[in-house]
Amino acid sequence: MKAQRTLGIVSVVAVGACSIVGLFLIPADRLQGEVQRLLYIHVPIAWVAMLSFFLVFLMSLLYIVQRKLKWDLLALAGVEVGVLCTALTLVLGSIWAKPTWGVWWEWDPRITTTAILLIVYIGYLIVRGISDDPDQRARWSAVIGVLGFVQVPIVYLSVFWWRSLHQPPSSPRSMASAFGAVMLSAFAAYTVAFTYLIMRRYRLAQRELELELRGPEELA
């Protein structure tokens, strides 16, 4: 618990520091101007969303192989963090798009495939609510967790496969030194925050399942 609390404090400080530097302290981009500052939040949040769904994929595979509910609970934690971050990615992207593209929303391949990704994992959460049996619920969820991950590389590759307004991925190393340093720091900070959120949600999911089962033995 103490380590988890420390990780939480580090997460808040790291994300807060990167946000302050990116939004207020670093010079504005020469071409995009002030709106480019949103990318220091938008891109790391999108990264956490993809990382979350990769965790869901791995935990779902582990559940299918071992049938242990702890893997299902970790997958659930990943889905909830991923859904939140995907929704934030779309919202922040829309805010960035208005001054850049002139519209809040465009049925661009990257945006459209990201919206589909969000729908897939919202469906995951809906399916979990259908069954009261933890094992059946975990089996159904694991199948969606594995198959739904197919959408993640589609989102990434969409800018290469189709003509897109969205710029292709760029490495922080290709940016000017200050921009790249802040972006790399933001990736690290948000990854720490991701770890903390997963740990907290997993612990809560354990307690919820214990109450549901009236005993912790099923988590072994």
Image (cartoon, helix red, strand yellow):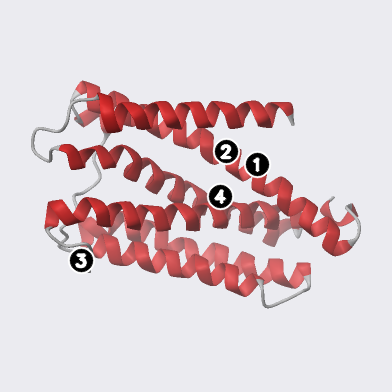
Per the image, label 2 sits on a secondary structure element best described as helix
Amino acid tagged 4: Leu
The residue where tag 1 is placed is: 199
- The secondary structure type at the circle numbered 3 is loop
User: Which residue is nearer to you in this view: 120 or 144?
Assistant: 120
Instruction: Tell me the quarter of the picture where residue 72 sits.
Output: bottom right
Q: Which residue is mark 4?
A: 55
- Residue 23 lies, in percent from the top left, at 29, 33
> For the residues marked 3 and 1, what is the alpha-carbon distance in whole angstroms?
36 Å
The picture places residue 59, in percent across and down from the top left corner, at 63, 53
Mark sitting earlier along the chain (3/1): 3
Residue 22, horizontal then vertical, whole percent: 29, 30
Quadrant in the picture for residue 144: bottom right
Amino acid carrying label 1: it is Met
Whichever of labels 3 and 4 marks the residue nearer the N terminus, that label is 4
Residue at screen point 49% across, 26% down: 13
Q: Mark 4: few, some, or many residues within 10 Å (few <14, many ≥20)?
A: many
10 Å crowding of disc 1: few (<14), some (14-19), many (20+): some
Furthest residue toward top: 177
Quadrant the N terminus occupies: top right
**How far apart in space, not on screen, are marks 2 and 3 (Cα)?**
32 Å
- At label 3, counting other C-alpha atoms closer than 10 Å, the crowd grade (few under 14, some 14-19, many 20 or more) is some
Disc 1, SS: helix
